Image (cartoon, helix red, strand yellow):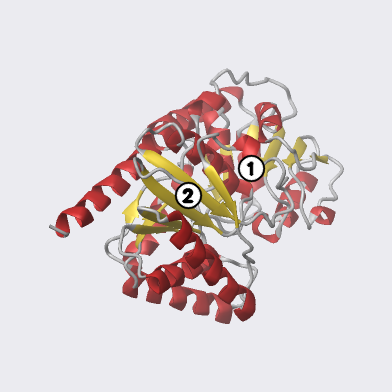
Amino acid sequence: MISKNKTVVLHVVEALGGGVYSYFTDLSHVLGQDSRIKLVIAYSNKRDEIDPEKVAQDFHANVELVLLDLKKEISLRSDFNGVKQISKLISQVNPDVIHLHSSKAGILGKIAIMVCKFKKPTYYTPHGYSFLRQDISTLKRRFYKNIEFLFARFSRTKTIACGDTEWGLAVKMNASAQLIRNGIRMDQFDSSKQHSNNNSLKLGTLGRISFQKDPTTFNEIALQSRQESFLWIGSGNLKHKITAPNIEVTGWFVDKNEAIPLLKQLDVYIQTSLWEGLPIAVIEAMAMGLPVIASNIIGNKDLVEHGKTGFLVDQNYDYVKFISMLRDLQTRKTMGAAGRKRVLELYDCNKNFKQLVDLYLHDLSSIEKQKY
């Protein structure tokens, strides 16, 4: 039974994985220590890179975890069941605040909120709108965009964007959208990065080897840069796309902290993704003082200041050009330091998640006052 001495906040997410997993573990450690909040996280564990048995170990002990059976793709039967699960959970938990994450849980959660006639504050964070995906047809992207637009306009749920460009898109659909950026726990990422002055650079990326992350382009960069070594921290269903002899693929880690020392080995971080929300891995690399070369897309361009903290790439052939520029040790040091400074200023989750709690309590108080 949940004590009502605290504000009960229910977060619902379709699947923990990648950057979303990092977001929620950090959220649990920040909000789990907040004496005003009782945090409940409902999630689906259908991701290859997640060990279901280890989730509880990664989250703060004060957080209650609830497993849901939600599927990523559209299915009338499974989605109807998903709405029923979330509706039942709302009735059981009796939260003061509900926060939905990612497109699938966002839509199903909004329907469940209407079914339950929930009148307290509700929020939605896309973490990268589904209509930005490049692995689906134009028709399906248009369908997803129309769904997002309709629910943004006609539901009571307030959109909380995780990045600046996502916020711009959200405002076009709903003027009441707010920006609270993703963040990381800075105590996990020290500034002791030692930049090597070797003739050969070590470049790498972290994440699932999937269509979204564009392993084909990453492989082509390595083939064109035979004198450099490359590291892909992670694995995935498109691992067979990695064929260049100078790329090492680590495989998945059961413990996320095992990946941090590998990031520290890099001289340059590369993000070749085709779409993003606000990529946590890039924030982590910048926090370590690494210059970043990234595709010029939503999410990446919110983080990387071109020519200051790294480079944004419009044409794939420019990756090699920018790698050549970063062979200069001083350039890497200067850009790396500027990137870490930017993370400290804008992407510290202790600051950003406090804004989130303050918003919850403010909106809840406003609703309570309207009753009297």
Which sits earlier in the primary sequence, circle 2 or circle 1? 1
Q: Secondary structure at mark 2?
A: helix
Q: Which residue is mark 1?
A: 270
Residue 69 in view (yes/no): yes
The amino acid at mark 2 is Lys
**Three-letter residue code for mark 1:** Ile
Residue 288 x %, y %: 56, 28
Asked where in the image residue 56 lies, by quadrant, the reply is: top right
Q: Is residue 297 visible?
A: no
Q: Residue at x 46, y 29 (%)?
A: 338
Q: Where is residue 189 drawn, in percent x and y?
A: 55, 26
Per the rendering, the mark at residue 301 is 2
Q: Is residue 107 above or below residue 347?
A: below
Instruction: Count the numbered circles shown.
Output: 2
Above-or-below relation of 84 to 241:
below
As measured in the structure, the alpha-carbon distance from the residue carrying label 2 to the one carrying label 1 is 13 Å
Position of 263 relative to 302 (above/below):
above
Q: Quadrant of residue 357?
A: top left
Q: Nearer the viewer, residue 280 or 226?
A: 280
| Quadrant occupied by the C terminus | bottom left
Give percent across and percent down for residue 229: 78, 35
Q: Nearer the viewer, residue 82 or 220?
A: 82
Element at label 1:
strand
Q: Residues within 10 Å of mark 2 (few under 14, many from 20)?
A: many
Instruction: Say which residue appears at 63% left-offset and 74% top-offset.
Output: 78
Q: Residues within 10 Å of mark 1 (few under 14, many from 20)?
A: many
Q: Is residue 268 left or right of residue 298?
A: right
Classify 54 as above or below 318. Answer: above
